[in-house]
Image: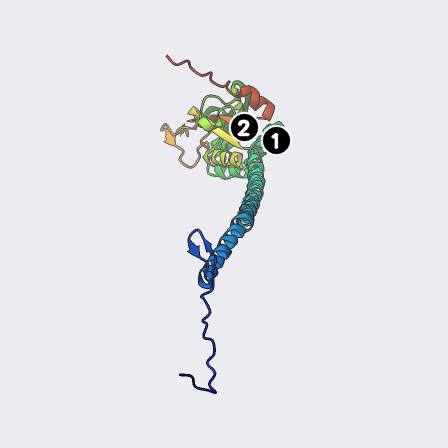
Amino acid sequence: MTISGDFIPDQTFEAAPDYPVVFGVRLTPRVSGILLALVGLLGAGALLYYLALPEWEQYQELKAKVDETEADIQQQEAIVRQIDTAKRDLETAKQQQQDVLTLFANESALDTLLLDLNRQIDARNADLARRKEQRLAQCPPEVKRNVREFEDKYGDLATKAELRRFEPNKDASGIIKDSSYGLQVNNKLKRQAVSVELVGNFDQTAAILQSIERLQPLLVIRQLTSSLDDKSKNVTFFPGSGNFVRLSACQPEPKITTKFQLEALLPLPPEEAAQAAPPPQANQPQK
């Protein structure tokens, strides 16, 4: 039955879009989006691998070189500081060496050694006349009338300090090699030895020995021996009364004879030290 006036359109439905199929996968928008995202990630990875990664490696190499250079600079600065410290220590050692060398004798000082020693001995005789008068005042008249005979027989009332011997000892002089001053001194110092003999009373002898220690060159007294003059022993005097009386207040002053070897130590010049140095020992062949 047909109803007039009604329009019934032709009902045709649109078919589903025909998406391409690749490798059995239909490229729908969602799948295409996923694929594009994957392609983007792959492209970014490729850019990172081929462009960014080499630059990063180059950066790391340059950074390592910079760090190495900075370490070298710091090491060089430390070496420079060590060199400066070593130079200061060397200058200090040189100054100390010069200070030590000034304590030793030198040729010019040895030239005046005899004069200096005589001057010290003469200084101990300044009060000789006074000391003789003091002792003579305590003697009986017979001694006062015969002072020369008394002194010839018994000894001087006041001892005069004298230098009886000052003779260089060539056998004991030369480069020190006998370890007499220690092993460290061998072949580094030399000595000038002098045999000395002097006379004086106890105070004079002690003062002379002390004055030798205060002389400018470094001097060492060795092999010291002292002996009392036979005339300086107890004296008896015959006053004419028939009895021997000991003159306790009128005695000759004891006279001491002192002998010793005086050694002046001198630093060995470099050329002599080189000649005196023992040759290096050859390596012993192993058996």
N-terminal-most mark, 2 or 1: 1
Q: Nearer the viewer, residue 242 or 275?
A: 275
| Residue 186, x across and y down, in percent | 48, 24
**Quarter of image, res 116:** top right
| Residue 268, x across and y down, in percent | 56, 26
Residues at discs 2 and 1 in contact (Cβ within 8 Å): yes
**Quarter of image, res 229:** top left
Q: Is any part of residue 155 visible from this angle?
A: no
Furthest residue to the front?
Answer: 1
- If the image is split into quadrants, where does the C terminus sit? top left
Q: In this figure, which colouring scheme has been used for the structure?
A: rainbow
Tell me if mark 1 has few (under 14), some (14-19) or many (20+) residues whose alpha carbon lies within 10 angstroms of its own. some
Q: What amino acid is labelled 2 in the image? A: Ala
| Residue 122, x across and y down, in percent | 58, 33
| Residue 276, x across and y down, in percent | 54, 20
Element class at badge 1? helix
Q: Nearer the viewer, residue 11 or 48?
A: 11
Residue 264 image label? 2
Q: Residue at x 54, y 33 (%)?
A: 218
Q: Residue at x 55, y 21 (%)?
A: 167
Position of residue 119 relative to residue 165, above or below, is below
Q: Which residue is mark 1?
A: 109
Position of residue 278 relative to residue 63, above or below, is above
